[in-house]
Image (cartoon, rainbow, N blue to C red):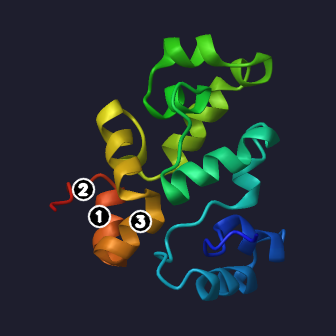
Amino acid sequence: MTDPSPPSIRDAQALDPGHTEAAKARLAALLPNAPRWYTIPKEVLRDLPEAMHDAVLMYVERGRLSAGSFLSAVVRNDLLDAVRRADPINVLRLKEWATFFYLHVPAGAWGSREKVDRWIEHGGMHGLVERFGPDRAAMIAGGQQHPTP
């Protein structure tokens, strides 16, 4: 059985490893509801362990996160728990994790347990766009306003 979920940002990036303007246009076609400002270029993920790429994209795009995981501790901004849960590779890359989230992930998706819970509740970026539309999703994802039911 095939996965019925729409193509992801990672699918669009696979079409063009350089993530050129043509790839961005294909991304817009694949994800018509995604805000144009929101992509995670492949070169940004290169600083993170490859084994973590899918988990990061799944969390940011869909709001899916394994409870009690290293990534869960990172997005909650819980340094002690992140160090405790990190494998030998991730413990050495904590600076890269912090830089990645600070520079490339919407502020509404990380930083506290409350923000993470809201992000998961709304289904990540895709859920925000579907529920609130691209403009309001951008404001919510950026942490500028809290969504009202």
- Considering only vertical position in the picture, is 90 above or below 10? above
Of circles 2 and 3, the one toward us is 3
Sequence-first disc among 2 and 3? 3
Label at residue 127? 3
Q: Amino acid at mark 2?
A: Gln
Q: Amino acid at mark 3?
A: Gly
In the picture as drawn, the residue positioned furthest to the front comes out as 1
Q: Is residue 58 left or right of residue 130?
A: right
Sequence-first disc among 1 and 2? 1
Query: In the rendered view of the protein, which quadrant contains the N terminus?
Result: bottom right
Sequence-first disc among 3 and 1? 3
Q: Are marks 3 and 1 in contact (CB under 8 Å)?
A: no
Q: Nearer the viewer, residue 38 or 132?
A: 132
Label at residue 77? none
Q: Are marks 2 and 3 in contact (CB under 8 Å)?
A: no
- Considering only vertical position in the picture, is 34 above or below 85? below
| Spatial separation of the CA atoms under disc 3 and disc 1 | 14 Å
- Considering only vertical position in the picture, is 28 above or below 106? below
Dot 3 alpha-carbon crowd within 10 angstroms: few under 14, some 14 to 19, many 20 or more = some
Q: Residue at x 53, y 41 (%)?
A: 65
Q: Is residue 147 left or right of residue 87?
A: left
Residue 2, position as x, y percentages in the image: 75, 71
Q: Are marks 1 and 2 in contact (CB under 8 Å)?
A: yes
| Spatial separation of the CA atoms under disc 1 and disc 2 | 5 Å
Q: Residue at x 63, y 27 (%)?
A: 95
Residue 14, position as x, y percentages in the image: 81, 70
Dot 1 alpha-carbon crowd within 10 angstroms: few under 14, some 14 to 19, many 20 or more = some
Q: Residue at x 74, y 86 (%)?
A: 22
Q: Amino acid at mark 1?
A: Met
